[in-house]
Image: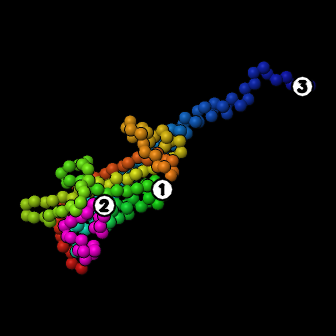
């Protein structure tokens, strides 16, 4: 005896319903993972800025012999051994993200102490050691080029976080990137250290 099939076979309907429900939930989950990674980089970048500002407050007034004869109370943005020491403080903080490829580039800038968000200054920057009434401050901004690495979510999340402007695309990796910035201010004491 042969069994006649029903005119409306509903086998596989549950699987199709599962796929319809699963895909939006999966994309939402990937977007949450991408957002959490970007916010973690933001938090670590803020910590890197604090470490770089603290290092700058120490390094700028340190012994010239330790920094290739560079002048005391002076740092040259973008070059020099004092600048390298400050940048290394930021890089050490960001090292886990640099090693896993999330952070593609790190810049350290020295905006004017009284102007948050201003452009970095060029040339040799001079700082006065702390006096009895005045305290000069060192402002350091760390800019981190962050790759959006979570597949598919990077095409959704990164443009939303770029606030209307197109996120940059890293040419070699074909990944959208976001520039994460953080600043910190530290008093410059100009303390001398005995070795």
Residue 43 lies left or right of residue 149; in this view the side is left
Q: Is residue 115 visible?
A: yes
Vertical side of 176 occupied by 134: above or below: below
Which one is earlier in the sequence, the residue at label 1 or at label 2? 2
Does the stretch in magenta take in 79?
Answer: yes
**Residue furthest toward the bottom?**
195
Query: Nearer the N terminus, badge 3 or badge 2?
Result: 3
Q: Residue at x 43, y 45 (%)?
A: 168
- Range of magenta residues: 64-83
User: Mark 3 — residue?
Assistant: 2
Image location (x, y in percent) of residue 181: 33, 50
User: Is the N terminus in the top left, top right, bottom left or bottom right quadrant?
Assistant: top right
Q: Point out the frontmost of discs 1 and 2.
A: 2
Which image quadrant for residue 133?
bottom left
Residue 36 to residue 52: above or below? above
Q: Earlier in the sequence, mark 1 or mark 3?
A: 3
Q: Name the mark on residue 101.
A: 1
Please name the residue shown 72% across and 26% down the image: 10
Asked whether the residues under the numbered discs 3 and 2 touch, taking CB atoms below 8 Å apart as contact, a structural biologist would say no
């Amino acid at each position: 005896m042969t069994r006649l099939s029903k005119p409306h076979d509903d086998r596989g309907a549950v699987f199709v319903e599962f796929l319809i429900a699963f895909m939006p939930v999966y994309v939402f989950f990937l977007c949450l993972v991408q957002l959490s990674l970007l916010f973690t980089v933001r938090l670590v970048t803020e910590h890197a800025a604090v470490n770089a500002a603290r290092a700058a407050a120490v390094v700028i007034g340190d012994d010239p012999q330790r920094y290739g004869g560079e002048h005391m109370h002076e740092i040259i943005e973008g070059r020099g051994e004092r600048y390298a020491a400050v940048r290394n403080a930021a890089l050490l903080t960001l090292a886990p993200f640099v090693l896993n490829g999330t952070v593609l580039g790190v810049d350290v800038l020295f905006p004017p102490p009284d102007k948050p968000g201003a452009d970095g200054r060029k040339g040799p920057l001079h700082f006065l050691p702390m006096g009895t009434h005045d305290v000069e401050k060192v402002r350091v901004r760390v800019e981190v080029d962050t790759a959006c690495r979570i597949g598919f979510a990077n095409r959704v999340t990164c443009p939303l976080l770029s606030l209307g402007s197109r996120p940059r695309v890293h040419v070699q990796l074909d990944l959208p990137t976001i520039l994460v910035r953080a600043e910190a201010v530290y008093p410059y004491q100009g303390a001398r250290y005995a070795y």
